[in-house]
Image (cartoon, helix red, strand yellow):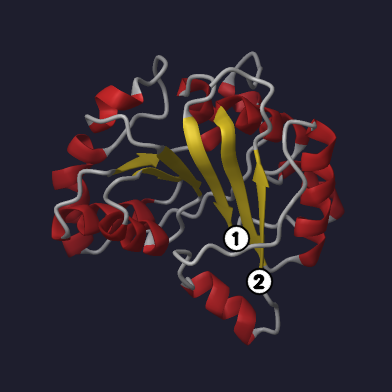
Amino acid sequence: MLRGDSENRLVRTFRPRRRKLGPELSKVYERLMDEWSIAEHGPTLDLIEVFGNDNQVCLEIGCGRGDLAASFGPSHQDTNLIAIDIHTRGIANILQGIENHSLSNTRVVEGDVLVLLKRFADASLSDVWVFFPDPWPKPREQRRRLLRPDVVQELARVLKVGGVLRLATDIEDYWRKSITVVAENESFDIPEFSRPDWRIETVFERRGISEGRQPVDICWVRKGDQPT
């Protein structure tokens, strides 16, 4: 697992950008957060207990405005999804989607995934999604990128054999260096360039395209060197 004397010593992968919610989303957040959220801190999660079933569980790291999670849940009722972000607006949007579509297969976490990952048992997740993460473009900042050796090792731990790590980014330096970092771990098969049909085009992706950046989707399958 990720180690450290305190969480303050974790190399954070995000820039805090707190924004106030409007009146409607504030009410949604206050009404639904307790029922549909998972705490970032705590003991190992029993995912069957969390969702009330033994369906596969996917983790979306950095749900942004919540567009993907809100669209995925209604069309994949047999798959459970946990969406985490440090920013409240996306969490509130997903909560609104849970209420609007009467979803039982979606949960949210407001917090840092480097903390949350400690709560997952070995080989407990089927998919991990890292879509348009903060690129941290400056050389001195790149140690903060999410797909770095210590985090990839933790993702390998929580993924089941045959589970999939997915990356989407429009930053060429990010995906090229991610391929190198994941290959060094040796827990994953060779990368495949493949975009899942359910990954909708988000506002961040559209912004990048308008600025001349093309998205790239890569996935890695967890190899079979751990018990399922």
- Label 2, secondary structure: give it: loop
Instruction: Check disc 1: other Cα within 10 Å, few if <14, some if 14-19, many if 20+.
Output: many
**Residue 90 vs residue 129, the one in the foreground:** 129
Q: Which residue is mark 2?
A: 215
Q: What residue do we see at 61% from left, 25% from top?
A: 157
In this rendering, does residue 40 appear at all?
Answer: yes
**Residue 199 vs residue 177, the one in the foreground:** 199
**Residue 154: % across, % down:** 64, 28
Q: Is residue 58 above or below residue 210?
A: above
Q: Which residue is mark 1?
A: 132
- Mark 2–mark 1 Cα distance, whole angstroms, equals 9 Å
The circle drawn on residue 228 is none
Q: What residue do we see at 18% from left, 36% from top?
A: 35
Q: Amino acid at mark 2?
A: Pro
Q: Is residue 170 above or below residue 78?
A: below
Instruction: Check disc 2: other Cα within 10 Å, few if <14, some if 14-19, many if 20+.
Output: some
Q: Amino acid at mark 1?
A: Phe
Q: Is residue 79 above or below residue 152?
A: below
Please give left or right for residue 55 compared with residue 157 in the image.
Answer: left
Please give left or right for residue 90 compared with residue 196 in the image.
Answer: left
Q: Are marks 2 and 1 in contact (CB under 8 Å)?
A: yes
**Residue 39 vs residue 105, the one in the foreground:** 105
**Quadrant housing the N terminus:** top right
**Residue 13: % across, % down:** 63, 43
Q: Is residue 201 above or below residue 42?
A: below
Please give left or right for residue 14 compared with residue 152 in the image.
Answer: left
Q: What residue do we see at 56% from left, 73% from top?
A: 205
Q: Which image quadrant is residue 148 in?
A: top right
In this rendering, does residue 112 appear at all?
Answer: no
- Label 1, secondary structure: give it: loop
Q: Which image quadrant is residue 168 in?
A: bottom right
